[in-house]
Image: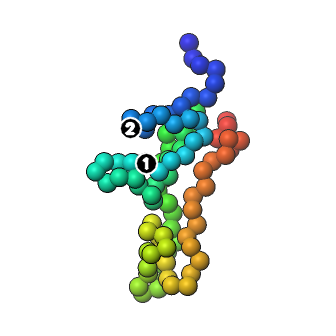
Amino acid sequence: MQADGPRACRFGRRWYLNNESWHPSVPPFGEMKCILCWCVSGETHCQRQECPPSACASPATRDNPCCAKCRGECPCSHIDTPTQSAAAP
């Protein structure tokens, strides 16, 4: 018999609710800030943050350790998590 409500996801030793998002923790590295995971109907989906290519010779990562950028550039865009309506079939 299948449950009527949305299912939770298990990632490692933790459970996450449907449509919940998190940065995974991977031993021995710790929290992976450049990767975002989310739960959709009992399935875990993960994606690395997408970064635009850097056009400068010496890009810096001080403001955003996931994406290199030229000094004076606006920050990299972040991946949006799916909304409940977008995740529905």
Spot occupied by residue 77 in the image (x, y as percentages of width and height): 58, 66
Amino acid type of the residue tagged 1 in the rendering? Pro
Q: Earlier in the sequence, mark 1 or mark 2?
A: 2
Q: Is residue 71 left or right of residue 31?
A: right
The quarter of the rendered structure image containing the C terminus is top right
Residue, disc 2: 12
Q: Is residue 80 above or below residue 83?
A: below
Query: Residue 63, position in %: x, y?
Result: 49, 73
Q: Position of residue 76 (x, y in %)?
A: 55, 70
Tell me: 13 left or right of 15.
Answer: left
Instruction: Look at 67% across and 37% down and name the residue there.
Output: 88
Amino acid at pointer 2: Gly
Query: Which colour style is shown?
Result: rainbow
Can residue 43 be seen here? no
Q: Which image quadrant for residue 19? A: top right
Mark 1 Cα-neighbour bin, 10 Å: few <14, some 14–19, many ≥20: some
- The numbered disc on residue 24 is 1
Please tell me which residue is depicted at 42% across the width and 87% down the height of the picture: 57
Question: Badge 2: how crowded within 10 Å, few (<14), some, or many (20+)?
Answer: few
List the single residue furthest toward the top.
1
Distance from Cα at disc 1 to Cα at disc 2: 9 Å
Q: Quadrant of the N terminus?
A: top right
Query: Which secondary structure lies at badge 1?
Result: loop
